[in-house]
Image: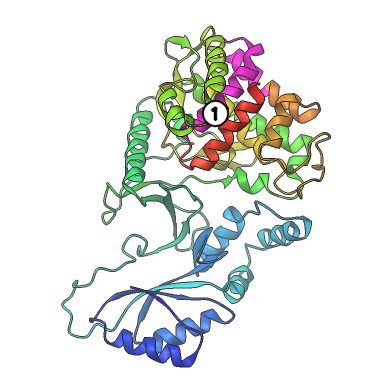
Amino acid sequence: MELDVPGTRAARRTLLEQIRALPAATSVILISGGVGSRGLLRRFAKSAGITVSREYLGIPAAASPTCYVEDTPEAVRYFVSHVLALPRGGMAASAVLAGARAAARFSWPRNFLGAVVPTRIALGLTAPGDAEPGAATQSSDLIAMAGMHSVVLALSKDPNAKVTVLFIPSGSSEPELAMKVATTESAQASLAAERRVLVELRSALPGDVLATIPAVSELPHAPEHLALVTTALQGTPMTVRYHSWHHVASPAAVRQDFAMAERWLAKFQASVSGERNPIELHNHAADILFQRFGAEDRFPPVMDRLIAIQKRLGAQRSPRTPVHGDFWFGNLLLGGDEITGVVDWEAGMVAGDPVRDLARFALSYALYLDRHTRPGRAVAGHSGLTAGNWGAGIEYAIGGEGWFPDLFRSFLQNGLVRLGADPERWRDAVLAGLVDVAATADHIEFARSHWRLFDRLSA
C-alpha cells in the first residue's frame, strides 16, 4: 500500500487508525513531502508500528522524479558525483552543482540532501502480529539486497519506460550491478531483446571491447521476464560533462567528446566485419512511418524525398558490423578521456548498418546545444545559433558555419571513409538518421519532432 503521510495532526490520526486496521506484516510505502519530511516520516512510522527497511530521497520530486536515492552515504555520494546533472539552468545553478560534486567525497552532501530534499519515500512493514513467516510479500524485494545500497533511476518518460536500479556494495564508491525493470509488456519485450544481444555480443567481440559492455548477470529474486540484471560499468555518463556550465561552448571540450566517440566506434565496428551491403539506416521503417505520420498532408512529398535519399545511400556500401542502435551521449560512460562503458543495448544487433551509430551520436549531440540558453538569445560559443526552435542545434550543425558545424561534418565524413563509403554522402546519412529516430523512438512526440525536422531540412 502506498500511503501519503499528511501534514496535519488530525489527518495523521485518521491515517494511523487505517494502518492499524491493516493485516499484520503488510508491505507499505510511506511518502512525505515538505519541510521537515525526514523527521515527520520517521515519527509517523514509529507511532504506526511500521518497521522501515529503506529510505529514499525523491529528486527532484515524487510526482516526476529523476531519481530515488537511498539515504545512505554510499548511494548519495555516488548520485552527487556520478549522476546528478543539470539539463537546464544558468551559471548560478551550475556553480552550485559543481561545488556539490567536488565535495561529494565528504559526508556533508548526504546530510545536506537529507535535510533539504522535501520528498522522502520509505519502504517498510506494519507490525508482524500473528502472521506466518513469509506470509507478506515485501514491496522492496527487488531493491532490498543485503549489503547493497541502491539508486533508482527513473529518467525515461517514454510510454514503455524501464526503471534502472544501481546496486552499490557497502563501503564501495561504485555500483556493482545494474537492474532494468520493465513497466509494460512492450518494455518486457525490449528487455528480452537486450538480453539476447548482450549474450550474442559476448561470443562475437574481443575482450577489450567487451570490457566496455555490460554482461548479463542474475539475482535470485528478479524474475527474468520482468527484469534484466547486468554488471555495472564504471564511469560517469557523458550527460554530466555535456551539461556542465559552458561545456558545449568550448571547442576543445567538444572536440574531445567527439574524439572519444570516434575512437570507441572505430574499435567496436572493426571488431567484427561482415559482408559489405548497401547503406540502409532504417530497414523496414516505411510501414512504421506510415502508421505514425501517414495522415499528415505532407507525408507523400516527404516520403518521396526520403526515397531519393535512400537510393543515394543505397549506392554506397559498408560492412555489416555490431550496432548499438541508440548511440547518444547519455548512454556513454567516461573515465578520463576514454569511454569506459556503453549501456542500454535494447536496439543493438551483432550485424547491422554501422552508419546508424555515427548519425545518432552526431544528431543527439547537436540537438541539445541550446538547452542552457533562454529562447531568443544567442547560444554562447556558437555564432549563428539562436535558442528557441526545436532542432535549432541540428539545423545549425547541418547548414551553419563555424567550428561546431565543421566538427559535426568531419565526424560523419571520417566515419564514412573508415567504413569505405563516400564522405560526401554525410548529409544524406544524417538526414536518414533523423528518420531512423522518427521510426524507432518510443515517445511519439519526440519521433514526430524528428520527422518534421527531416521535412524542413530535406526540402
Outermost residue to the front: 297
User: Mark 1 Cα within 10 Å, few/some/many (few <14, many 20+)?
Assistant: few
In terms of secondary structure, what is the magenta stretch mainly? helix
Q: Nearer the viewer, residue 93 or 392?
A: 392
Horizontal and vertical percent position of residue 241: 66, 46
Residue found at the very far left of the displayed protein = 132
Which residue is at a point 42% across and 40% down the rendered structure image? 214
**Residue sitting at 36 percent across and 52 percent down?**
183
Q: Which residues are magenta?
A: 411-440
On the image, the x and y values in percent for residue 445 come to: 53, 42
> Is 390 placed above or below 300 here?
below
Q: Quadrant of residue 31?
A: bottom left
Q: Is residue 419 magenta?
A: yes
The answer to whether residue 201 is left or right of residue 233 is left
Quarter placement of the C terminus: top right
* Residue under label 1: 297
Is 8 covered by the magenta stretch? no
For the rendered model, the colour scheme is: rainbow
In the displayed structure image, the side of residue 53 where residue 246 appears, left or right: right
The three-letter amino acid code for the residue at tag 1 is Asp
